[in-house]
Amino acid sequence: MYFRKELTFSTDRHEDLVDITSEINVAIVESGMEHGVCNIYVPHATSGVLVNENDDPNIIEDLLGVLRKIAPEGSFLHDRIDGNGDAHVKSAIIGPSESIPFKNSQLLLGTWQSVMLCEFDGPKYSRKVIITLFTG
């Protein structure tokens, strides 16, 4: 059995990590499924999704700082087209999806873990996140 739902988020910074954990848990509850695996997929070439700590906002800034060092703005051939080569590289490093088990209709995340939508080319008014739930 599976369930699919598309969520939409807006971002208000050029680069940001947005906690989307609660919206995903709401979708799991809506599905009526008790346990299984939740796949979170972002169908965009300049954003991604990751699981990490979201209790300390410095973690977000530290992660973005490392990505800026690895993929500095203005240093890519693609910048000649639309000026966002770094966003494509950062997105490729982070990746477009995560799969997380869920039980009792809640993601099985660690105490400090959150699912975060990664924005590398914002702000954007409509970032899609596709949630697909599987159970056996």
Image: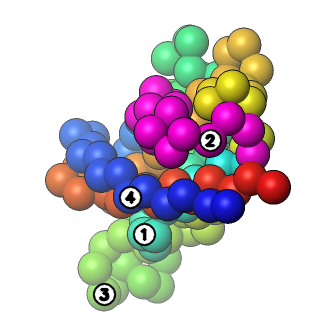
The mark closer to the camera, 4 or 2, is: 2
Q: Are marks 4 and 2 in contact (CB under 8 Å)?
A: no
Q: Badge 4 local density, few (<14 within 10 Å), some, or many (20+)?
A: few
User: Where is the C terminus found, in terms of image quarters?
Assistant: bottom right
Please indicate whether residue 100 sits to the left or right of residue 90 in the image.
right
Dot 3 amino acid type: Ile
Quarter holding residue 92: bottom right
In the rendered structure, find residue 19 and report the number of the disc placed on it.
none
Please indicate whether residue 11 sits to the left or right of residue 115 in the image.
left
Q: Is 104 placed above or below 44 here?
A: above
> What is the distance, in whole Å, between disc 1 and disc 3 at their CAs?
17 Å
> What is the distance, in whole Å, between disc 2 and disc 3 at their CAs?
45 Å
Dot 4 amino acid type: Glu
Q: Residue at 66% x, 49% y: name it.
A: 38
Q: According to the image, label 2 marks what residue?
A: 33
Q: According to the image, label 4 marks what residue?
A: 6
Q: Earlier in the sequence, mark 1 or mark 3?
A: 1
Whether residue 14 is visible, yes or no, is: no
The mark closer to the camera, 3 or 4, is: 4
Dot 1 amino acid type: His
Q: Residue at 75% x, 45% y: name it.
A: 36
Q: Earlier in the sequence, mark 4 or mark 1?
A: 4
- Point out the residue furthest to the right here: 136
Q: According to the image, label 3 marks what residue?
A: 81
Magenta span of residues: 21-36
Relative to the observer, which residue lies in front, 114 or 53?
Answer: 114
> What is the distance, in whole Å, between disc 3 and disc 4 at their CAs?
30 Å
Q: Are marks 1 and 3 in contact (CB under 8 Å)?
A: no
